[in-house]
Amino acid sequence: MNKIGYGHMVLDDYVHRLRAIREERRQKLDAIKTPEDAIKYRDYVRKVVAKAFAPFPEKCPLDIEYGEILDCDGYRIEKVRFASRKDFWVTANLYIPDNLQGKAPAVLGSCGHSLEGKACDTYQEFCLRLVKNGFVVLIYDPIHQGERDQYAKLEYRGAGKDLCAAHNVMGKQLELIGESFASWRVWDGRCALDVLLTRPEVDPTRIGITGNSGGGTLTEWIWANEPRLAFAAPSCHVTSFLTNLENELPTDAEQCPRGVIGAGLEMVDLMIAQAPKPVMLLGQKYDFFERRGLLEAYADLKQFYKAMGCEENVEMFLGPTTHGYSSHNQEAMVDFMYRRANLPGKAQPTTPQAHTEAELAVLPTENVVKSGSKPIYELVRETAAGWAKCREVPKDQQQWKTLLNELLHLPERSPQDPPHFRIPRPASAGGKLWARYAVETERDIRAILRKRLVNRNLHNTLDVEAEVHLYLPNISAELDAEEAYAQNLNPDGPIYMIDPRGLGESMPEEAGGDFFQAYGMDHMMNYFGVMFGESYLGRRVFDVLRTMDLLVAEGAEKIHLHGRGMGAILATFAGFIHDNTASIELADAPASFQQWIDDPVPAWPSSTIPFKVLRHFDLPDIYQALQPKLKIVSYWNAQMKP
């Protein structure tokens, strides 16, 4: 493909915007001089956090069941099963020291991305170090880890065959109903804390939380949402959103709270949410969560806590190795927890001996779904069915336009003020010569417009006909130029094609499987858009709308839109909104968003999903509203196949 240097366009735009947001944040932090100033900032952070993780469900009965008890050297492990939602089970191990004298401090353990979940040797080790030092510890299996494989009954696992990819599949489906995987993960942790607080051995005023990597993420997210916790020590997570963005680090759906960047926060602000309670940041010298971001976060925390008059409540430890909860970090965490729990003397070093996964299994089947829990995709279906019964589809064109603008978070545009465009060199595709135009839709974002030339000499100007055929490709205009569907459109006249941001010439990856991988750059750009409080899909629709504005300004009176695959979604939304749309023709279009929930592991990427769309309408509703302008040539199913 002809990259022509646009591959980092979206990323660089995000970087520039995030730097500007961080500069404003820096000025606010530097202006905090008194405890009153600090409390005002902390309370703002709490409001942002509450909005970012909403909605949480109503609490249901925990339905706690205790199973076999393992008697060990100086402690015991109780096997626990509880429900964080009705018929949605969580498996956990409860570590309790022998010979407790009175109520003990406790720690909630959050697992990182390990298939074994709570039985991962490394995560067992931090539990064992804590229990040997007098702590009650509850560590639970995250969704789709350990005994909580959600796809245990499926023959075809598709995009969910891998752990992190499965998390992102679940994230996509939750977005369709207006929920987030981050919130679901946090809710599990909050319910696990409820379980811990039912235990008579536990002192409710001395409960901490720790975890590593993805468990470090959950440690911070749960901490920000949970005032009942007393101290926290996330490991190998806290850095800055900027370093993760600049270094192109992939993220799970659970790691991107909605709107936090757009609201002016950096990652460490979620630790500030419970200030002045004691916190320790743990990292590694050679972690891919880069130490520059960790050191910056630590400095921000120290500065903030100093203004509150409790600078001593912030600590940091930098381990000597690569990503992971190494023994160095575990020992530093235990020492921190021991001191903050006001236990006598000093924490004692220990050499943990991990148990086997089978020994720690809570259920005979070693799987919640096989034992009677509902899988997450069934719960999503139930919620979608509930919304389908009560949603009110827009009644007229204006209501549709208003709703689409809201769902897609479209920026304001002035059709009378068309965007500037450049004229790069022409390029060949599909055996034809195409003129190229870089349409500046906003800031440094450029949609690449192509025109299939009838006269090969007319590539240095943009001369637009009164009636235009504009084609929106699946992932690339250059690739779709080879498709028979595109080649047969207006065979004797010009065809226009557009690559919106992140597609075609501005695609960060090579075309093909890399684009659709669950941890790819398209996924990453989409979820940074989520944290900006935007819609990546909406920004692509905006690119199409601004390009249509340009075509109209240059002479087009009627625009016939043709969309294929992902481009069919863009054509549907842009075609409804733009006043000069004469007709819309879709090929390989999705039949419905509901299909992406009915199939447990849909393949359509996260960047095609309007957040909470199924609370308002499904694709057949808007297809019907577009009649008689709309023609659908062919459909794709949830796997992006005929």
Image (cartoon, rainbow, N blue to C red):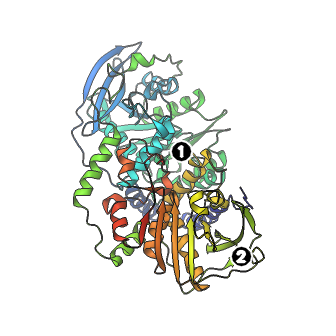
| Residue visible at 33% across and 17% down in the picture | 99
Badge 1 amino acid: Ala
Residue 168: percent from left, percent from top: 47, 45
Q: Which is more toward the observer, 120 or 604?
A: 604
Q: Which is more toward the observer, 77 or 480?
A: 480
Badge 2 amino acid: Arg
Residue 318: percent from left, percent from top: 63, 38
In this orientation, does residue 298 appear? yes
- CB atoms at circles 1 and 2 under 8 Å apart? no
Which residue is most to the front? 492
Q: Return the residue at label 1.
A: 518
Q: Is residue 385 left or right of residue 605?
A: left
Image disc number at residue 422: 2
Q: Which is more toward the observer, 27 or 379?
A: 379
Q: Which is more toward the observer, 109 or 299?
A: 109
**Position above or below: 60 against 617:** above
| Residue visible at 45% across and 16% down in the picture | 356
Of label 1 and label 2, which has the lower sequence position? 2
| Residue visible at 24% across and 45% down in the picture | 59
Quarter holding the N terminus is: bottom right
